[in-house]
Image (spheres, helix red, strand yellow):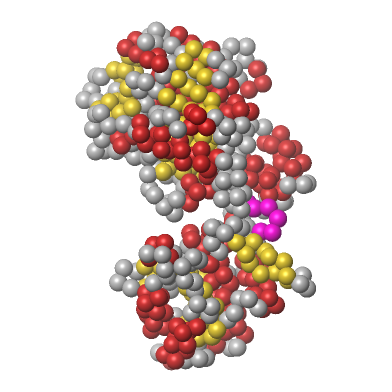
Amino acid sequence: MVAADDGTWPLDFPTLYVVPDWVTRHCKLQSVGGLDPEPQSFEMYDWQLRITANFYRIKPTAQPGQLATAFHYRRAQAVAPQKSGKGPWAASIVAAEAVGPVLFAGWAIGGERYRCSDHRCGCGWVYEYEPGEPMGRPWNKPLIQITATSEDQTDNTYRPLQEMIRNGPLSEIMRVGEQFIRLPNDGRIDVVTSSAQSRLGNPITFAPQDETGIWTDGNGMTKVATTQRRGLAGMSGRSLEQTNAWDPTENSVAQKTAETKVKDVYRYHRLPPKDLDYTKKPERRKIHASVYQGSRHIDLDSIEGEASELMEKEPAEAERFYGNRITAGMGTWLQQDRWDARIALEDVPDGTALVLGFDGSDVDDWTGIRAETLEGYQFTPTYGPDNRPCIWDPEEWGGQVPRLEVDAAVDELMGRFNVVRMYGDPPYWTSEMAAWQARHGEKRVTEWQTYRVAQMHAACEQLLTDVTKKDTSFRHDGCETTSIHVRNARKAARPAKRYVLRKATHIQKIDLAVVSVLAHEAACDAIAAGEARTKKRRARGF
């Protein structure tokens, strides 16, 4: 998974600077609340400008005539809290994609100008390029679909777009209707929902996709997203998602975009400090101040009023909508932000005394190993000449976990470190576990069955407590796969008020969360047995 931009990435790359300037000149909105009688030029907030700059980032190798391939990113995602300004900003990008200079038109030598008069606009605006700056031009025939789950949802983008057009010079070249906008050269902007099946397969040049955090298989919007991307590919077009944070149990389009491993998708998601608790009002205020930073129209007192009311019945939803955090509803085992708050990168030298946790699968679930030092630092170890992480997804290995790779990894870790204990869940791996016991000793390699309810419940509660308590010494390496698997884990109720871990959905893996539980249980047992003291005596003897 490629990390999202949190607002700190450098902006030292070539981009179509002409686009935000064009937006300010052509897009006009009446201020929120109607305090100003006249519409004002739309000037992007800093976070909106950051996303725009990345969306129109040009490859240094771009050549005139290239369309989507001239850009560094094929598509983009903006995750921002409720009422922060996503809709008007997306509307301004739609206006630019309709008639503005959004395609790469070569590199400026110096003195070149973009003139609106050359593109049917009579406003008289001229933009002069700097030497070496990428230049822009409009689409010849733009075909745009503003897309959401319902017509009411599309209004988030479509209504401010209509206002921008009617209030400024765009009204000369764009004809506004209730369901579509007519553009020059038979181009058009359509409003599309999942019910508009006949239009979804059409070739398009741009698709703003609203609230993809609620686009799921259940409401048919996953299919809409994939269908639109096929239409965009045919025209060398691009797409832009804007959404609130999502419920990770729903496997939404937004979640899939956030978790994809490809590098040509830009993601912006400014998260609040991980150590702040949304249930505490003073800390909630700090969270709001962080995630709404730069949205000058926001009154944090008003946001607090809405959030506190929603907290009474839907606390997870309040935290997603207003705290910009990815939180799940009932049954969540461990909130991802609490887990991520324990990230503390450390070096673990060869020879360190530690424990291993192992959970093995065959053709569906993942197989993994996590290590934990006896001082409470947990990490995903690496193995082999390429230092591969000890995580095996069957899809990356021809549909089946590579058992020889796993076997080699175990042997290497046993030799590199002073492994005092290894707990492994044996289903599918009884032969390998027996072989490891024979090679490395039964006292070091132990079968630990996760189906035992009382023991698994206690182990899960131990890790949960040690992650979330205030004075914890537990920390970890920030392994992204483990973080996702922790987030996916849900409590499955069992008798006597106990639980075991289950998946949120059948495709959302939790294997590395289980491995973390086993590693931590092994560490706790080793410390209780006095093996930490043994380790210190050995260290003095070297």
Q: Is residue 495 above or below residue 525?
A: above
Q: Which x, y percent locates residue 288?
A: 64, 42
323 vs 362, left or right, is right
Q: Nearer the viewer, residue 463 or 50?
A: 463
Q: Nearer the viewer, residue 506 or 36?
A: 506
Residue 347 shows in the view = no
Residue at 42 percent across and 90 percent down: it is: 439
Q: Which x, y percent locates residue 27?
A: 49, 18
Q: Residue furthest front?
A: 198
142 vs 167, left or right, is left
Count of marks, rendered view: 0
Q: Is residue 478 above or below residue 439?
A: above
Which SS type dominates the magenta stretch? loop
Residue at 48 percent across and 51 percent down: it is: 259
Q: Residue 153 appears in which quarter of the rendering?
A: top right
Residue 513 shows in the view = yes
Q: Which residues are magenta?
A: 327-332
Residue at 60 percent across and 20 percent down: it is: 31
Q: Which x, y percent locates residue 80?
A: 56, 39
Q: Is residue 172 above or below residue 246?
A: above
Q: Which x, y percent locates residue 430?
A: 50, 83
Q: Quadrant of the C terminus?
A: bottom left
Residue at 62 percent across and 85 percent down: it is: 528
88 within the magenta span: no
Q: Is residue 463 above or below residue 165?
A: below
449 vs 397, left or right, is right
Q: Quadrant of the N terminus?
A: bottom left
Q: Residue 155 appears in which quarter of the rendering?
A: top right
Q: Residue furthest left?
A: 109
